Amino acid sequence: MTGPMFGVIMAGGAGTRLWPQSRRQKPKHLLRLVGDKTMLEMTVERISGVIDAEKILVVTMAEQANAVRELLPLIPRANIISEPVGRNTAPCIGLAAIVVRDRCPDATMAVMPADHVVGNRGRFEQVVRFAARQLEAHPEALITVGIKPRRPATGFGYIQKVERCDEVDGFGLFNVGRFVEKPPLAQARRMVADGHFLWNAGVFFWRAEAILREIAVHLPELGSALDGLAHSLGKEDFDKRLAETYTKINPISIDFGVMQKARSVLVIEADIKWNDVGSWASLASIWPSDEAGCA
């Protein structure tokens, strides 16, 4: 039986594709780009419907940590985890996983970016609950979320769904055939027409122990570094060890480093409105246009 679920929000990066509004010191997840709240606040609210604040962790850059703490007073200070430098999503997730496992060895994780827009909060909460139930049935699985594509987008990654494993409340659970990173337009059109490809939403569910085991297998150097950090958790020299370790870690994404190589990977096909707000063009698809057609 799996333990409680922790929410992990990845809030690093500079969002340079939204320059000049988004900068290193003030990245897009700290901006009010959609509505009157920052994207990070919206992400915390979205997951707080199913996970209590004391079990929500935010992984951010050291230079952004104070701004994140001020923005999220209900999140315990110990839950704001600072990376010395950005090393992409695999180290970020691994760092969060050792913290979660230290607090509860059997815990599961719901991992998501801080800078995505998701419509229909209630439906998203249903996705999280569905994933939690699936982890009970598939405790060693790495589960990701795919969105049925609305158009042949070239700015998103894609996930190929194959055999169906389960279906509840309109959510299908499938084995994953392969991942495709940001294809050219012709390939995107073929995949959308095929009907078996989903947009990669960058949202993941797994047991903390399971993802750490997969990191150790597929990214052994990172796995070894995380083992060393795990032994230093709670000690006075942890921040020093963390800084030293991060100078030696190679940047790599969790998709490329683990998800594309692991065997037990499943995808939930979710019918939620989603956008990764990775560019001004994607923002324009969210903002209403005026009579002249300008956002």
Image: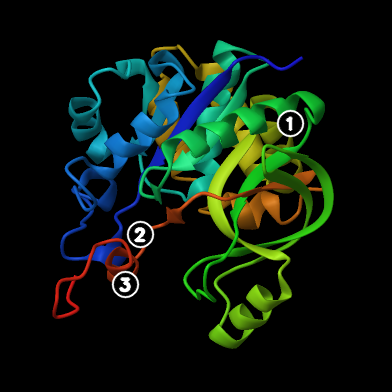
Q: Residue at x 60, y 78 (%)?
A: 188
Q: Quadrant of the N terminus?
A: top right
Q: Nearer the viewer, residue 20 or 177?
A: 177
Question: Mark 1 highlights which residue?
Answer: 134
Residue 271 in percent (x, y) is at 57, 50
Q: Dot 1: what SS?
A: helix
Q: How is the image coloured?
A: rainbow
Q: Residue at x 48, y 41 (%)?
A: 112
Q: Is residue 70 visible?
A: yes
Q: Relative to 148, does residue 5 appear above or below in the rendering?
A: above
CA neighbours of label 3 inside 10 A, class few (<14), some (14 to 19), many (20+): few
Q: Dot 3: what SS?
A: helix
Type of amino acid at the residue the image marks with label 1: Gln
Type of amino acid at the residue the image marks with label 3: Ala
Q: Which numbered disc flags the more N-terminal residue, 1 or 3? A: 1
Q: Residue at x 67, y 82 (%)?
A: 190
Task: Say the numbered circle drawn on residue 266.
Answer: none
Q: Nearer the viewer, residue 33 or 209?
A: 33
Task: Say the numbered circle drawn on residue 281.
Answer: 3
Q: Nearer the viewer, residue 85 or 52?
A: 52
Q: Residue at x 65, y 32 (%)?
A: 130
Is mark 2 in CB contact (under 8 Å) with mark 1? no
Cα distance in 3D space between marks 1 and 3: 35 Å
Question: Mark 2 highlights which residue?
Answer: 277
**How many numbered circles does the render carry?**
3
Cα distance in 3D space between marks 2 and 3: 8 Å
Q: Dot 2: what SS?
A: loop
Q: Nearer the viewer, residue 221 or 288?
A: 288
